Image (cartoon, coloured by chain):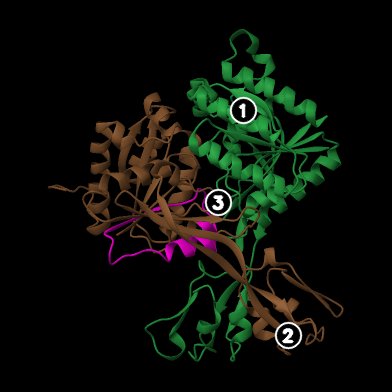
Chain colours: A green, B brown
Amino acid sequence: MRELLVISGKGGTGKTSLVGGFAVLAENKILTDCDVDAADLHLLLKPTVRETREFYGSKKAVLDHERCTGCGVCVQACRFGAINMGKGRGNTKVQIDPISCEGCAVCSHACPWGAIAMKDNLSGYWFISDTPYGPLVHARLGVAEENSGKLVTRVRREARSIAEDQGLDYIITDGPPGIGCPVISSISGVDLALIVTEPTVAGTHDMERILELARHFDTKTMVCINKYDLDEGKAEEIERYCRDEGIQVAGKIPFDEEVVNALARGLPAVAPADNGFNQREGKASKAIRELWMKVSSYLK
Amino acid sequence: MVIAVASGKGGTGKTTIAVNLALTLERDMPVQLLDCDVEEPNAHLFLHPLLDVSEKVALPVPVIDQSKCNGCGRCSEICAFNAIIAIGTHVMVFPELCHGCGGCSRFCPVSAISEEPREIGVVESGRAGQIEFVQGRVNVGNPLAPPVVRAVKSKIDARQVKVVIIDAPPGTSCPVVASLKDSDFCVLVTEPTPFGLNDLVLAIDVVKELDIPFGVVINRSGLGNKDLLTYCRREKVPVLLEIPFDRRYAACYARGGRLVEEFPELKEAFWGLWRRIRALATTGQTEFRGPS
């Protein structure tokens, strides 16, 4: 069983569209969406949710106004500015802002009156679903919640266990943007990180940061240049950079409005083989097919 | 006035909107631009600021004085992040997991724990033309972005500056919340695709949770489908500006160009955006009439 992660650093370079294409092309696989705070893969794969599980991230401080004397020890103890003295008097003064609460519990330990408890906080859900392309594990982090990294870890653990049970060959993961906590949780231990970039100054800059992160975690990488023909000069610069760094450019996908049109219809950019694709396959779809051949032959 | 530019989905054009709004306003009023996408800051690629100040952002992480530690394990009970673990009489610290809450050192019964700063990122500031520019960068490999975001926002200069523009990271989780908190208005940038709409709805949940007035900018309009506009109309979400998909705009962005300087029609459009933001943020009315 081999794990492929599709990431980009910069958002909107086409991660989900690519994974949607791979979902059509790859056989005997499970798909996961690790962009848990703005998941989109389900819009292409049309999952039927089989199981819904609750996700509890960190705990949150909750004040018992009956016990609180308004002494203010907690206000001093909190380093995240989550506890403030309001306008009220006595036990109505202290206010805890759950959005700023980091869940460290220092206030609760510090309170001389035992007035602050740490309560479990439902931070989101994760799902095991069936799709026409195979099983999908995905998640939904609650609004303005923390612990996206923990939720990613949960999703990955479940996907691995399903892949092992069913003897699947691949785990294909749609990763989050950025280089922070959910990305770090997504990248650890994968067999290949495919980095999707675009020929723009921002795409190049962000690709360099995500490559640095992959090096930091000793992860094998390949690069794919999406919409490469929007600026062929920039695309060549990216290729040169990758050559110098010893990173394989596994694919170059042209800009093709068919990708947006398919997406607008809620379909992957690659048509299934039994749809007569070879007759009228778009140029982007063809490039994604070639890319998958390269990626899968590396993973074999 | 603090205006945050955000989006659920990445790559919709947050930086484009933030940068070009700042460029539109800079000659008429003092403007500060804060790049709070500290994982992947990009605004500098378009503004080329002269960054003459660089400050480290550090978190206080525990250091154990082994000569005082009696191995009681209180620190590892206190730590909610598994950043400090006592195995027998040996205490181990995992600094990259530490949130800097100070619990371990505060509650160590034998005062064996002190704190030392651990660098997690940097805040750089300077000028780009008339624009006062600040950006944060989290160190590669460090998972904690919000403290760097908060350090960038500590540079907000509300007395000297009339308009503060925040370029936020994508998503809906803690780095986004840290960026948006206490803003007077939020511009949500999206695109007319199912991904754009899905993530806009999530982003609207966030700004509503934070109680920030907001409006939407539709980028690359003309591509995709009509569902986004239908949604905005139905939910009475103000559409502040639509930027049509145009290969010339895409090419300008690709090479790091400035839309409002190359396309006069967009300069006009960004003035309109500013007027609508100001009207919505200050009076709550949906249309502003009169001179800028």
Q: Position of residue A162 (x, y in %)?
A: 80, 43
Eye-nearest disc, 1 or 3: 1
Eye-nearest disc, 1 or 2: 1
Decide whether residue B147 is among the magenta residues: yes
Chain to which mark 1 belongs: A
Q: Nearer the viewer, residue B74 or A223?
A: A223
* Label 2 sits on residue: B112
Q: Position of residue B172 (x, y in %)?
A: 51, 52
Q: Amino acid at mark 3?
A: Glu
* Label 3 sits on residue: B39
Asked which quadrant contains residue B105, the reply is bottom right
* Disc 3 residue crowd, few under 14, some 14–19, many 20+, Cα 10 Å: many
Q: Which residue reaches farthest left?
A: B290
Q: Say above or below: B184 vs B44.
A: below
Residue A239: numbered disc: 1
Q: Is residue B144 left or right of residue B128?
A: right
| Discs 1 and 2 carry the same chain letter | no
Q: Is residue B167 left or right of residue A299?
A: left
Q: Position of residue B64 (x, y in %)?
A: 74, 79
Structural distance between the alpha carbons of marks 1 and 3: 23 Å
Span shown in magenta: B146-175
Residue A103 in view (yes/no): no
